[in-house]
């Protein structure tokens, strides 16, 4: 039916139908003429904080644009109305009636509205999309950092293997020289600390499920304070009050380190303008029944770890959100807002609680409550046993000459007849020439030409019952299931000491443990 024959009621019904379609659109629809908003749908009105389109009609369109993008939007509108541009597609930061800004994407076209040039467009809020893109970018960045960390840790472990190995060899050779013995013991002590650091790097890069074990908290707290002290401004002082009681919790030490580093870093950030005091207190709640009740904790022994600062403090509304993912009070580029959320997750996973106290202008205190592991005998040092020895013949393979030479001397001191080889192809030929003369093969995992797993596969084809031990400084590719599939009997993570490799060798050769 032609429009001139439609009744007024029919035209009203069609107009209402069109309006309903436009208002229910998931994207904002609008018309701007002479910089004035002439029409908008309900979606666009709500996007900018208006209750309905009527409140928005007639407003200067530039009021809905962030000051930083007004020149851009003004240029696009004038190009449309002058006829220079027919269609345009661009992004800009819009301004909510409440003052906040958000990013939008708009597609505009030149039209004639009520006899005059105007701009019609559709708009959508892409701020959440941008946030997800940033999160993805951050995740990719962290993955890259993790890969880099893995590579560093791998090389670092090889270096430490050399240091630890030769230090132990020297200790055995010079036990009568007291000064040299003391010096070498210090080298070993520092090397083991570096070994733990490398393991933390690997744990971070792998993002694997953390294994809980009995851990002494006191040394971790002291280690973190040593690490963070170097990065603090001279205007920030550290006070520590660590109980002489040794506290043990069931946790992953890397995660405890991560929690404390995060809290101390946040505390330092709160004092970066005026300086202040960073205080760390470690105590227990065995007798503090009131504190246990306040935290809704079970009536059992808990330790309390408190990290306090004398910084700017927080308002109540900020305190309510600090554990929310991606919430941060830091400026762009200074933090992701994930730190405290991760901290809370770790603490909860350890069956603990975390609380916060803060007052504007006076500072903030975070309190961690962790259950004390009472079966402390589980980590008591066991009497040192004699290192097991043997006289079997071992094929030792590693592409680093220094490591092979050190391994030959170390295993030689244990009584073994060692054949050292620095190339995997040469190792295969050496074994093929006299397979029955070898009782065991120890090979590095990552080597040129042929990896340790490939070499093991070829050796087992020649002599199916030959036991193989794989050494590696990076354990991502090592899983016990596929080790058994390839016939490999055991693996050992670099850097290892003489006792570790000696025990592994005897377990494999004596078949005391099924790997």
Image: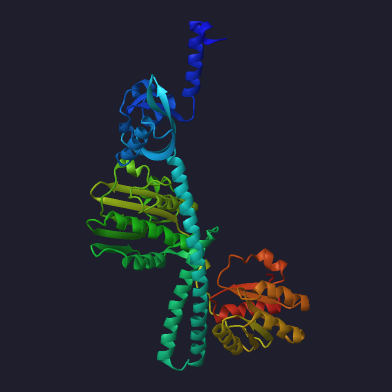
Q: Determine whether 145 is above or below 434 in the image.
A: above
Please state which of residues 366 and 142 is positioned toward the viewer in this rendering.
142
Q: Kindly identify the residue that appears in the image at 64 percent across and 85 percent down.
A: 421
Give x and y (percent) for residue 485: 72, 66
Q: In which quarter of the image is residue 276?
A: bottom left
For the question of whether residue 251 can be seen, the reply is: no
Q: Determine whether 488 is above or below 385 in the image.
A: above
Give x and y (percent) for residue 165: 52, 83
Q: Kindly identify the residue that appears in the image at 51 percent across and 74 percent down.
A: 155
Q: Name the image quarter holding the N terminus.
A: top right
Q: In which quarter of the image is residue 414?
A: bottom right
Give x and y (percent) for residue 143: 50, 58
Residue sitting at the far bottom = 176
Q: Kindly identify the residue that appears in the image at 42 percent across and 26 percent down.
A: 111
Please state which of residues 401 and 190 is positioned toward the viewer in this rendering.
401
Give x and y (percent) for residue 35: 32, 29
Q: Determine whether 249 is above or below 40 in the image.
A: below
Please state which of residues 189 and 428 is positioned toward the viewer in this rendering.
428
Q: Name the image quarter holding the C terminus.
A: bottom right
Q: Is residue 225 left or right of residue 361?
A: right
């Amino acid at each position: 039916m032609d429009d001139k024959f439609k009744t007024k009621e029919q035209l009203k019904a069609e107009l209402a139908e069109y309006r309903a379609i436009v208002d229910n659109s998931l994207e904002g629809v609008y018309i701007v003429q002479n910089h004035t908003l002439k029409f908008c749908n309900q979606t666009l009105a709500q996007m900018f904080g208006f209750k309905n389109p009527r409140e928005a009609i007639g407003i200067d369109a530039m009021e809905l644009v962030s000051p930083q993008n007004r020149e851009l939007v003004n240029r696009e509108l004038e190009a449309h109305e002058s006829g220079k541009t027919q269609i345009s597609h661009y992004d800009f930061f819009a301004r909510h009636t409440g003052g906040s800004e958000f990013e939008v994407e708009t597609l505009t076209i030149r039209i004639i509205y009520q006899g005059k040039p105007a701009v019609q467009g559709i708009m959508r809020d892409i701020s959440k999309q941008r946030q997800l893109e940033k999160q993805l970018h951050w995740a990719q960045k962290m993955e890259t950092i993790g890969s880099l960390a893995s590579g560093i840790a791998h090389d670092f472990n090889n270096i430490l293997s050399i240091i630890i190995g030769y230090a132990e060899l020297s200790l055995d050779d010079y036990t009568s020289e007291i000064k040299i013995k003391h010096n070498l013991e210090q080298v070993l002590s520092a090397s083991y600390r570096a070994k733990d650091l490398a393991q933390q790097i690997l744990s971070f890069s792998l993002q694997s499920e953390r294994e809980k074990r009995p851990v002494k908290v006191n040394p971790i707290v002291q280690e973190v304070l040593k690490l963070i002290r170097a990065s603090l401004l001279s205007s920030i002082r550290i006070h520590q009050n660590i109980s002489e009681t040794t506290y043990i919790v069931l946790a992953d030490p890397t995660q405890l380190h991560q929690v404390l580093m995060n809290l101390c870093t946040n505390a330092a950030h709160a004092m970066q303008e005026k300086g202040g005091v960073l205080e760390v207190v470690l105590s227990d709640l065995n007798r503090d029944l009131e504190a246990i009740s306040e935290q809704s904790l079970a009536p059992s022994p808990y330790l309390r770890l408190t990290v306090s600062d004398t910084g700017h403090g927080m308002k109540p509304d900020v305190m309510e959100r600090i554990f929310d993912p991606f919430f941060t009070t830091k400026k762009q580029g200074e933090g992701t807002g994930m730190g405290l959320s991760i901290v809370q997750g770790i603490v909860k996973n350890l069956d603990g609680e975390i609380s916060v106290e803060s007052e504007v202008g006076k500072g903030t205190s975070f309190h961690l409550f962790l259950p004390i592991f009472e079966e402390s005998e589980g980590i008591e040092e066991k009497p040192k046993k004699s290192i097991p020895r043997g006289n079997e013949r071992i094929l030792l393979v590693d592409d680093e000459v220094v490591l092979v030479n050190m391994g030959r001397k170390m295993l030689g001191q244990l009584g073994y007849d060692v054949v050292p080889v620095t190339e995997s192809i040469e190792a295969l030929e050496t074994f093929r020439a006299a397979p029955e003369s070898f009782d065991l093969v120890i090979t590095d995992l990552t080597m040129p030409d042929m990896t340790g797993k490939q070499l093991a596969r070829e050796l087992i084809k020649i002599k199916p019952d030959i036991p193989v031990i794989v050494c590696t400084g990076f354990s991502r590719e090592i899983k016990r299931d596929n080790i058994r599939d390839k016939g490999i009997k055991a693996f050992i993570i670099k850097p290892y000491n003489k006792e570790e490799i000696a025990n592994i060798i005897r377990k494999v050769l004596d078949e005391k443990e099924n790997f």
